[in-house]
Image: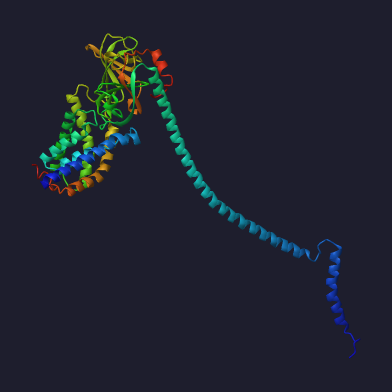
Amino acid sequence: MNYFTFDIRKVLFVIFALGIPLLLVNLQRKSEETLLVLKPFTMASGLIQKGYSTFSAGVRGTTGLYLDLIDIKKENRLLLHENQELRAQLGAMTELRLENERLNNLLLFKQRSEMELLAARVIGKDLLPDHNTITINRGHLHGVQKHMAVITVGGVVGYVFRADNHTARILLLTDRYAAIDAIVQRSRSRGIVEGSGGDGGRMRYLRRDEDVREGDLIVTSGLDNIFPKGFPVGTVSHISKSRYGMTQEVDLQPVLNPTSLEEVFVVLNANHEVFTMDEFAQLTPLREDGP
Amino acid sequence: MREVSLVFANYSLFLTSLLLLASLQSSLWMQLLGSFPPPQTWVPFIVYAALYRRATESFVMIYLLTLAVASLSAIPLGFFLLLNLLLAGFIFLFKERIYWPGSTYFVLVCGSSVILFSVLHFGLSWAIEHNPARSYHFFDWTLGSLLTMLLGFPLYRLMTWFDHLTQKELPTEAGAQWL
């Protein structure tokens, strides 16, 4: 066997096959630049990777959004629940604040007045819509008697027409059966205030030559020491005189809406207290809309 | 003796449930819903007595029912009694002409009775009272009538159950058993 016999084509193929990678290795070591031959592949793989990356980001984004939505939904539910709780608390707080203001007004009024007053809470109203009565949570056992006056800081409410041991029924000023002795504050003309069954009342038995004008304040006369004298009942809203009658009829609007009351005072003893408007204003410094 | 006990039990059940419902109407309803018109809870009891009792018994029952609820209103007892008896009379007359058994009839008569009571009250007030009614509470009447009709269905079931419980027989034909 002759070891020195070469097939030159084979030798050249081997040299070429080994030479190119060696040459490439050598070239790569010398330069940081990407080989021209690799550039298409690099570019292609880069694009593919970028594609994958975008796809992956998209998938992650969508998944994240979906997961976030679930969280948001949960969070929203929690916030709604919390909001409802807070609203309920706010409602209760507002109710308490208003009640506190009302009771504070009542307390101030009671402290400054000379009358013997008994505070009571309204617990019921009339069975029939055509009558205006309320029930209070005070009765005989608390000193309440029939015909006692019922007032609040704003004015006259009515009077007791039935008293039991624990409760009493109050005939409101606006009821058709109610009758209260009253005077026109400006002219001191006297008449009887009767309810109309709706939300107003009328002053009757007022002589036709008596001086009364629309807007005049009607106050209690204080007779019999049931109501304090000069306590507001209502304001004159309309006057009518028949052609031949001896009296004139005066429609009046009560100073307060007795059907919307929650707390009232029963006058156990009026002590002959007399109210002038100045005194009334001093006694009710916090009065705004209600009692 | 057993019959007397059953009658007593029947009346007691009717009066107790009437008192509970009427007190609910005049107290709890106001505390929960303010001045929103309530159903006239006592009317179905009057209607039931007028429809499903013989005339004499219904007369006694209406007396008792009126006595039970009169204290919850400012209306004088005599006037209230007169109105309820008149109402029952109208129901008797109506029953003689148009009647079919069942809760629908009862409920319709309940609704009409609320309106009729208010109209009778208004009319009689003008006839006999010194300071008659001047305000028409149409909204209250109408809404009260509708709510009373709604209440009529469960109340009919309740009252027939009371009768069943106390072995009370219902008259089957309108006007067949006046006395």
- Kindly tell me whether residue A234 is visible in this rendering: no
In x, y percent, where is residue B116? 21, 35
Q: Quadrant of the C terminus of chain B?
A: top left
Q: Residue farthest to the bottom?
A: A1
Front in this rendered view, residue A255 or B71: B71
Q: Residue farthest to the right?
A: A4
Residue A177 in which image quadrant: top left
Q: Residue farthest to the front?
A: A141
Above or below — where is B62 with respect to B102? above
Q: Residue farthest to the left?
A: B179
The scheme the figure's colours follow is rainbow
Instruction: Please name the residue shown 18% across and 41% down the image.
Output: B12
In x, y percent, where is residue A73? 52, 49
- Kindly tell me whether residue A239 is visible in this rendering: yes
Question: Taking A275 as reference, is B5 left or right?
Answer: left
Residue B29 in which image quadrant: top left
In x, y percent, where is residue A234? 33, 18
Front in this rendered view, residue A181 or B82: A181
Question: Taking A231 as reference, is A32 left or right?
Answer: right
In x, y percent, where is residue A236? 33, 16
Question: Taking A111 as reference, is A202 left or right?
Answer: left
Front in this rendered view, residue B148 or A155: A155
Instruction: Please name the residue shown 45% across and 32% down the image.
Output: A94
Instruction: Please name the residue shown 18% across and 49% down the image.
Output: B165
Above or below — where is A66 with respect to A280? below
Front in this rendered view, residue B68 or A255: B68
| Number of on-image labels | 0
